[in-house]
Amino acid sequence: MLLAVLTYMGYGILTVFGYLRDFLREWKIEKCHIAREREEQRDFVPLYQDFENFYTRNLYMRIRDGWNRPICSVPGAKMDLVERVSHDYNWTFSYTGRAVKDVVNMGSYNYLGFAENAGPCTNAAAAVTLKCGVGVCSTRQEMGNLDRHEELEKLTARFLGVEAAMAFGMGFATNSMNIPALTGKGCLILSDELNHASLVLGARLSGSTIRVFKHNNMQSLEKLLRDAIVHGQPRTHRPWKKILILVEGIYSMEGSIVRLPEILALKKKYKAYLYLDEAHSIGALGANGRGVLDYFGLDPSNVDIMMGTFTKSFGAAGGYIGGRKELIDYLRCHSHSAVYATSMSAPVVEQIITSMKCIMGEDGTTIGKSHRAPLGFINMYRRRPGKIFSSKFKLQKCVNNYLHRRSSAKAFSPIALPPSRSGQLRSGPDSGFGSTGQSENGPGRERIRQLAENTTYFRTRLQELGFIIYGNKDSPVIPMMLYLPAKIGAFVREMLKRNIGVVVVGFPATPIIESRARFCISAAHTKETLDMVMHWHFTRLARHLALAAISEVGDVLRVKYSQPRVPDARRRPFDETTYDGWED
């Protein structure tokens, strides 16, 4: 309650000063940088809505340096930022010609780490560029339909487990241009209140009646469905031609996962259609990376329209629609995005195909091969588990020493052997460690598993440090609450000082009192990058570590609003220095 009051007070003070500055600008006391009509156009209908821009010029402009930063490298686990400065309070920026090197990237949607400039995906994209060029210069229905497009759609349908699929060149347009082709006047759309702007725009363009239900609230959704069936259309009370439910797999601002089993039950009960947007969940959820359906173990045929994008987990661009063959054939003729948009670029298509085959284990790598650790290392762990894992530095040293002595351990990879949160080594059929059976541990599956482990670890450590975290425990989108408007800009600036690039979000993208920082975890992040050294005297050596920087900034800005969770002492019998002098 106190936080809410203080947040409203902060916005109130900013609003008062905003009106004061507008008064000074009107009387030419303060220089005005905002866009406005020319004097000779004063009698025209306003081109710029002055009051609607109040927030932009008086609040957003104060912290504008936290957004739109140009990068000059691959947006992988680390990236390079173009250095820029402002001499007029963020109205304009000038570039110094230098770059901020090796900034830890905690903001890109590079969930599986396929945004890279080396490796099989890059090589395949480069080869097809030499063969087909970069641009297609036509639509799919004219001269822009490549054989690679056909292969991509067949592969996507097989990956999703549906009859057919169709690819589009832009993820946003996949929603905004296809929903109007599916519904129209006399139809009802039931939309989650936190749906993405592309879904909202598509629903509005369709001309359908739109009703909004509370986020992930099944009672609210069922009430709307029941009322729609009982009362029908307004005034005429005729039955709705079609009822379409719009939901997302992972909500990008909340980090929450859709309650899909319950929505499917309501869909079947009330004979409605379901449109599932898996922009953030495809590739990032499920043991096979096939999204929320894979996560919940559900049949893809239960969802009428499956939508997703290639811009995140696949490191490319564009989107797709999957479903029954009749649906895809209809969209090929009636979707504006299919009829009028230029075809996807050949290298982008090849990037998607290669990364998707990697996820599916069809890239000819190590699928089906056993990834067992050397028996000697397992026995060594069983003899002295506390000594091996009392320090993360000792763990890596122990692994490297053992591999140096055991030439037979070439297939062993330290990344496949992460310790669990309790400090004990994971083992079992899914871990690839100590397993005697065959397991699918190709590069794609390894990325999926690494993403899940990074997500669990990072989210748990933030909660233990005392931050308030939103979202589902398995979601790689992790919002951390800041609340107060003054802390939005301060957080992103302080993190950048420590070479950590983060995304901060405020009103109107979120409720006015729920400003936040949003972290996006990637399989490309290593534990060393995410980790935090527990003791303060290590912090200066670990400023490049994300959690160390976040904790330090959290103390400086006082955004640790939650009581820190104290780890159970029985689970951590050794401190970081217990076996500093021990070597195997």
Image: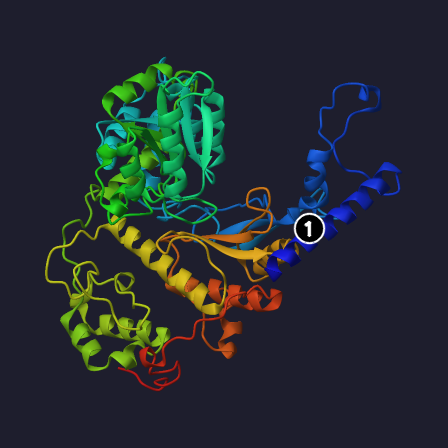
Q: How is the image coloured?
A: rainbow
Residue placed furthest toward the left = 437
Residue in the image at 28% along x and 64% along y:
414
Residue in the image at 48% along x and 50% along y:
107
Answer with left or right where residue 82 lies relative to residue 448: right
Residue 432: image location, x then y, percent: 19, 60
Q: In the picture, which quadrant includes the C terminus?
A: bottom left
Q: Quadrant of residue 228?
A: top left
Helix, strand or loop status at disc 1: helix
Q: Which residue is mark 1?
A: 11
192 or 369: nearer the viewer? 192
* Vertical position of residue 163 compared to residue 332: above or below: below
Tell me if mark 1 has few (under 14), some (14-19) or many (20+) residues whose alpha carbon lies within 10 angstroms of its own: some
237 or 370: nearer the viewer? 237
Residue 199: image location, x then y, percent: 45, 31
Residue 505: image location, x then y, percent: 56, 48
* Vertical position of residue 370 compared to residue 401: above or below: above
* Vertical position of residue 295 compared to residue 141: above or below: below
Residue 96: image location, x then y, percent: 66, 49
Three-letter amino acid code at the position of disc 1: Tyr
* Residue 129 can be seen, yes or no: no
Q: In the picture, which quadrant includes the N terminus?
A: bottom right
Residue in the image at 34% along x and 37% along y:
351
* Residue 553 can be seen, yes or no: yes
312 or 350: nearer the viewer? 312
Answer with left or right where residue 436 lies relative to residue 153: left
Residue placed furthest toward the top = 142
563 or 23: nearer the viewer? 563
Numbered-mark total = 1
* Vertical position of residue 403 compared to residue 475: above or below: below
